[in-house]
Amino acid sequence: MAAFGHTFPFYTGLKPIFPMDTTLAVIIAIFLTALVTFIIILPGIRGKMRVFWLLRVVTSLFIGAVILAVNFSSEWFVGQVSTNTSYKAFSSKWISADVGLQVGLGGVNITLTGIPVQQLNETINYNEEFTWRLGENYAEEYAKALEKGLPDPVLYLAEKFTPNSPCGLHGQYRLAGHYTSATLWVAFLCWLLANVMLSMPVLVYGGHMLLATGIFQLLGLLFFSTATSLTPPCPLRLGTATLHTHHGPAFWITLTTGLLCVLLGLAMAVAHRMHPQRLKAFFTQSSGEDPALEWNPEEGGLLSPRYRSTAESPEPQDIPLSEASSEACCKKEHPREPDCTL
């Protein structure tokens, strides 16, 4: 019989579950705050440049948010199955539940949700994370899970990723996660440099850094796919069903963003060759209404107007003066001279 608020006295209570990963929530909040800030100052930009400027800001923030978010996401490799399986060790009771597995760059996340949630006089709703990031010990986390007495499906999946498991999933996904995470951080650095260069009179180099951003994202996907395919898939049997995994949303959104960066970088390189004036106009805040300003085709940063130099200014013209005005001017400058006529 259940006790202590419908939970077994030998197991700890359920941890409160946040609707989403707190790290992802912080990243999304930061970039949304930046987007709202830019939208607030949007009315201060005149003419058609307002639309171009908004497009550049939204695209840039989207790329940066994706690179950071997927680096901390646990949905690179996912799988879910509905099954009837045993619930606790040393118990013949079975439950009907949804079992989910999410593999990220820094660890695995295992979920267990009862169908219905209330079964065996207990709330069956678990969300457990096991990490292998630098400084973390996966084996110790698994040992703590055994001490806590987590349900059998959670412990079964977690055991498959331990270093001593014959499946070899720990070394496989840990290696893939480390190399992919490193390349994504390089891609994020290239994204920062691209934003800096696109705000300066070096548009073509900003396009090159945007191209490098996409290349490093695609390179990270190559590392992940290669490392995770080194060994044959390990069967994951849970009760009456088998759990099958596949690439998750984080993998596909990284692929999409990487291809987008590559296309944008190539488009900027081609535009710099064929239509430098249009490329310059797209990345400037001036709408071309002031004829006193001229723009160098090699420039075009956000804050780099090129004013006409003195050497390029029209030659000064001599304005003839009347005889009366010339005599008055001469007497004013040379009062002692008797004859001031020109």
Image (cartoon, grey):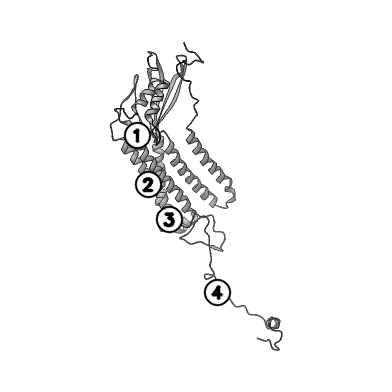
Image point 47% across, 46% down: which residue? 60
Q: CA distance from mark 3 to mark 2?
A: 17 Å
Q: Is residue 268 above or below residue 5?
A: below
Q: CA distance from mark 2 to mark 4?
A: 51 Å
> Mark 1 touching mark 2, by CB under 8 A?
no
Q: As shown in the figure, which amino acid type bears the numbered disc 3?
A: Val
Q: CA distance from mark 1 to mark 2?
A: 22 Å
Q: As shown in the figure, which amino acid type bears the numbered disc 2?
A: Ile
The residue under label 1 is: 173
Q: Secondary structure at mark 2?
A: helix
Q: Residue 118 in the image: x percent, y percent? A: 47, 17
Closer mark to the observer between disc 4 and disc 1: 1
Closer mark to the observer between disc 1 and disc 2: 1
The residue under label 4 is: 315
- Quick one: label 2, few (<14), some, or many (20+) residues within 10 Å? some
For the question of whether residue 260 can be seen, the reply is: no
Q: Secondary structure at mark 3?
A: helix
Q: CA distance from mark 4 to mark 3?
A: 35 Å
Q: Secondary structure at mark 1?
A: helix
In the foreground, 290 or 107: 107
The quarter of the image holding the C terminus is bottom right
Closer mark to the observer between disc 4 and disc 3: 3
The residue under label 2 is: 215
Q: Residue 147 in the image: x percent, y percent? A: 41, 21
Question: Earlier along the polypeptide chain: callout 4 or callout 3?
Answer: 3
Q: CA distance from mark 1 to mark 3?
A: 38 Å
Identify the mark at residue 204; answer none if there is no mark.
Answer: 3
Q: Which quadrant would residue 322 be assigned to in this image?
A: bottom right
> Mark 3 touching mark 2, by CB under 8 A?
no
- Quick one: label 3, few (<14), some, or many (20+) residues within 10 Å? many
Q: Which quadrant would residue 187 be assigned to in this image?
A: top left
Q: As shown in the figure, which amino acid type bears the numbered disc 4?
A: Glu
